[in-house]
Image (spheres, grey):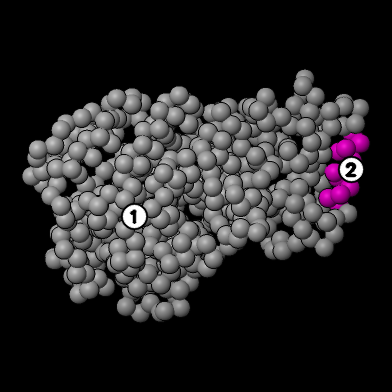
Amino acid sequence: MKLIAQSENIEKFSENNYIYIDKTEYIYNLTKNYERVFFSRPRRFGKSLTLNTIGTLFEKGVDPYFKGTWIYDKWDQDKYPVLHLSFLKFSVTDLDEFKSDFCNEILKFAKANNITDYNDNKEPKILLGNVFSAMPDGRQLVLLIDEYDCQLTANINNKELYEEFRSLFREFYAVLKGDKHIKFMAITGVTRLKDVSIFSVGSDIKDLSYNNAYSKLIGFTRDEIKHFYLDYLKLGVAYENDKAPEIVTDSEVESLIDRMAVNYDSYCFDEFYKNKVFSTYSVNNFLQDIYEKKTVRFGDYWYDVGGLPSILMKYMESHNLNIDNLLNSEIAIPYNDFVNPTSLIDINENVLMCQTGYLTLKSEIDRNDDIILGTVNREVRAALFSLLTLRIYERNVSPYASGKKYVLEQGSADDVISLFNSVLAVLSYDKYPVNDESVLRALLQVYLLGKGHDVRVEQHNSKGRSDIIVNFTKRRVVLELKYTDKNSEEQKKLDEAEKQIIEKGYGLENLGDRDLLQIACVFNGDKSKRQITMFKTVERQ
């Protein structure tokens, strides 16, 4: 079996017998059709490998790195020197240090390519212009810039430094516009911003972030996973069913990919809302786990490494997220907010959530209509609510009782209500005040989802909608919540909750052989209480 890649350098793939998901046809078309491109994708998605692949083709050609790929007998470009910059390596806190880092990379490039007789300068835009001027007529280079927005995202709460970096980038890209010494240029980042001049002063750069033709350039399609990772898929089925990989059937492989899709698929970067891709990082780690641990485990890999972008943490230091919106399966965004975000400082929060990978397109991009966004898959949904719990609750409240058993799964009604009151006690009430039933329900849902529970909110049955249902293998917990801020109303509200559970039969639908725990409860929102003050276990009728 070939190995799953552990590198963002395409040269390592042939050296180490890594599997390469062949994206070279897209790269060929990209370099034939455009001279300057930009595309945004979330972290850990494959942007760096894509740029490295482009750079290797231009600098070293197809031998020996691209044998067996689509492009091997089609690439006919001359070789060009490549200036490959990753802004992740440069200072994010000091503008002068950033300039120094930037200029040092330009100087190293000039030296490596025997470019001399240029004037040194401490300004990157001037230095690169001077290097261009020292190049003979007709000589060209390839310029690749990875994570162009790193310094901006790091300073979302430092307006002065943010503006200094923004101005520097604006001037830098203005110098590059139309320069005859650039054969090809590609720029990547997490965010898409109109104020960085990539899309204004540098208007000859084509934004392909949601271009249908390149929507599968970064990320894995279902067909690619089945073709290139078939050995790993068969191994997973074999471990699950205690059988030899050679006798695994195609339908069994398809079934495993179906389950992978629930967890890792459905990112959409397609203006027509047709093409969807899996998370590359999550798929690779899932399959690597099968190989190393001899088991099939749907882990939350993306969140552990790339799912908590610093930009979101910084954004949430100065902004409150709209919890109700994020709990919805569909969020409508004005066309202009989505297509033309002007600054990270005042970006629409849901557009930012989309750019960082927490939400994705759920509709085509139509200038005459709103853009619909929604959560991507189970892994990202869990990551989203883990992120929200970090923001909403001032400290962690464990969902476990002694023996590492979930309180909701095995505890009594007293245990369950005690857990919820502990959760509500550490709530940031100044930022997320509980003033009605819907807010209470949403905040408890965030906590439960953040802990990985199977939660259904306002679950429909033939008679009505229950507030919260939590499913386990052998138990179902039903909560009917009522809100008041008056002590005198508590008993009345409790009676209402109990009556609803009984009359509506909440939790009975598709119960199977699970135990059913139905709890009616009342939250008192008075500042002196702020807890569930009354509750009752409802006897199954």
Q: Check disc 1 and report the residue beneath it.
A: 36
**Quadrant of the image for the C terminus?**
bottom right
Determine the image quadrant of residue 429: top right
Look at the image and tell me whether residue 361 can be seen.
Answer: yes
- x and y, in percent, of residue 47 in the image: 35, 52
Q: Report the magenta residues as a range.
A: 491-502
Q: CA distance from mark 2 to mark 1?
A: 64 Å
Report helix, strand or loop for mark 1: strand
Query: Is residue 161 a member of the stretch shown in magenta?
Result: no
Q: Residue at x 23, y 28 (%)?
A: 122
Instruction: Tell me the amino acid under the disc marked 1.
Output: Arg
Left/right of residue 514 with respect to residue 18 in the rendered view? right
- x and y, in percent, of residue 237 in the image: 40, 69
Q: Nearer the viewer, residue 113 or 287?
A: 113
Left/right of residue 3 with respect to residue 311 in the rendered view? left
Q: Nearer the viewer, residue 150 or 304?
A: 150
